[in-house]
Image: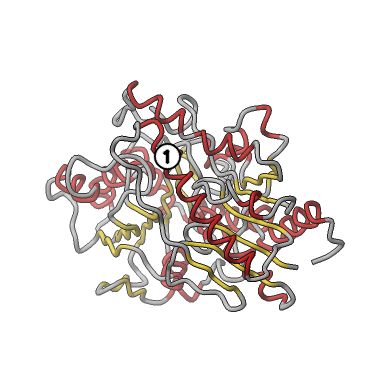
Amino acid sequence: MKFLFAHQNFPGQFLHLVRHLAAMGRHELVFVSEPNQNRIPGVRVVPYRRPPPAANATHMVARDLDAAARRAETVAATATALKHLGFTPDIIIGHHGWGELLNLPDVWPGVPLLGYCEFYYRLDGSDVNFDPEFPTPAADHPRIRAKNAINLLALQQGGLGQTPTEWQHSTYPDWARDRIALLAEGADLDRAKPDPKVRRAPLRIGKTTVAPGDKLVTYVSRDLEPYRGVHTMMRALPHLLRARPDLRVVMVGGNGVSYGAPPPKGTWRESLLAELDGSVDPERVLFPGRLDYATYLKLLQRSDAHVYLTYPFVASWSLREALAAGCAVVASDTQPVREFVTDGRNGRLVSFFDPKGLADAVLEVIEDRALSRRLRAGARAHAEAHLDLRTTLAGYEALIRRLTGASEL
C-alpha cells in the first residue's frame, strides 16, 4: 500500500505508526514535512519550505487561517510534484492543525483521508481563562474563535478524523464528534518500563550525578511554561528543599514557548527564579534543557516522584511514558489528567494552583513507601491496560482498512 503522511514536524504524532508500517517492509511511505534531522529507515521524507508569514496588514483574527492557507498551497504544490512523478497514495494521513491537508483532495480526488484532530478551541471549559494569573483579555476572544476556521474546513473535507482522548474528543461540537474516531495514543511498554537497576545506580545528568541515596523529583515539559504548570512547580521548590536536604529536582524542558504567551521579558524560568529570589539552590535543582530519549527514560525510571501539571489542554506523551515507566506520579487535578490518573490508585491528584499542596503530596509519596509502591504498581498496571502501543497500532490498522477497503495491511 502507498501512504502519504503530512506533518510540519516529521514524524510528529505518527512516529509509532510510521515505524510500524516501515517494519512490515511491504509499503511505500512518503512523508511531507518541513525539513528537520529526523529520519526513519524505509520512509521517504519530502521536504517543503515553510511559507512566509502573513503580512502585518492581515487582520489579527485572520492570521492563523492565512498561515494555514499558505501552508496548504505549498504542500499541495509539493504533492503535485509527487503526482507528476507517478506517486498516488492509497491513503493520506496527517495533522489537521496547520492546514497541510486542506488542498490535498484537490491533488488526489477520492483518495481516503485520515486526519488528526487535536483540539477545538473554546472560550470556556478549557485552557482559556483557566489560570487567573494569566487572564485572556476579551479583545483576544475573536482571534481564539477564529483559530477554529482550520478545524471547520477540515471537518467539511470528508474522510475521517481521529483524536487520542475522550476529553479532546469532547472539545469538538456535537455535530462533529461522529466524524472523529477515538484512538488512544500508547507508549512503547517494552522501552518505557520500570528498571530497578537504574534506581540502584548513580544517574548522570549533564555535569551532575544523582546518587542512589538522593531523593529525586522529576518534571518534564517540552518547554518550561505556565500551560504545563512551571510556575506552580517552581513555587513548590522552596517547600521541598527545606523539608528534605537529600532532595534533588530535575526539571526537563526548553526555554521557549510552545503554548500560550511569552513572559514580559526573558524566559519563564528566569522570571520565576527571580521571583524566588535565591531560595532555589542551583546545586539541587537542575535545568538540563531537553534530553535525548535514552537519558529521559532513565530519569523517569530513577524518579522517586514525578510531577505532571497541565492546563485543560492536550495531555503530553511524557505523562503516558511516566505511567509506563512505573513513576509515582503527582499530577494536576485537571480534566485531561483525570483520564489517565485516579487519585490514590495510580498517582496523586492535586490542585493546579497550590504550590504548597503540590509539595506536600510529593513529600508524602517520597516518605510513604507503601503508598509509593502502590502508586508505582498502579501506574504500570494502567499503562498495560490502556496504553499498550500494540493496541494503538491495531486501532490504526482498523481505521486504515475501514477507509481503504483493504482486507489486510
215 vs 54, nearest the viewer: 54
Within 10 angstroms of label 1, few (less than 14), some, or many (20 or more) residues? many
SS at mark 1 in the image:
helix
- Most distant residue in the front direction: 84
The residue indicated by pointer 1 is 64
Which residue is depicted at the point 64% across and 49% down?
A: 106
Task: Tell me if residue 154 comes above or below residue 132 in the rendering.
Answer: below
Based on the displayed image, in which of its 4 quarters is residue 91 positioned?
bottom right
Which percent across, then down, holds residue 60?
34, 32
Which percent across, then down, holds residue 251?
32, 57
Query: The residue under label 1 is which amino acid type?
Result: Asp
Which residue is depicted at the point 32% across and 51% down?
A: 224
Which residue is depicted at the point 47% across and 24% down?
A: 124
189 vs 357, nearest the viewer: 189
Which percent across, then down, holds residue 341?
56, 45
| Quadrant for the C terminus in the image | bottom right
| Quadrant for the N terminus in the image | bottom right
Which percent across, then down, holds residue 16?
61, 65
Based on the displayed image, in which of its 4 quarters is residue 287 positioned?
bottom left
Which residue is depicted at the point 43% across and 48% down?
A: 308
219 vs 28, nearest the viewer: 28
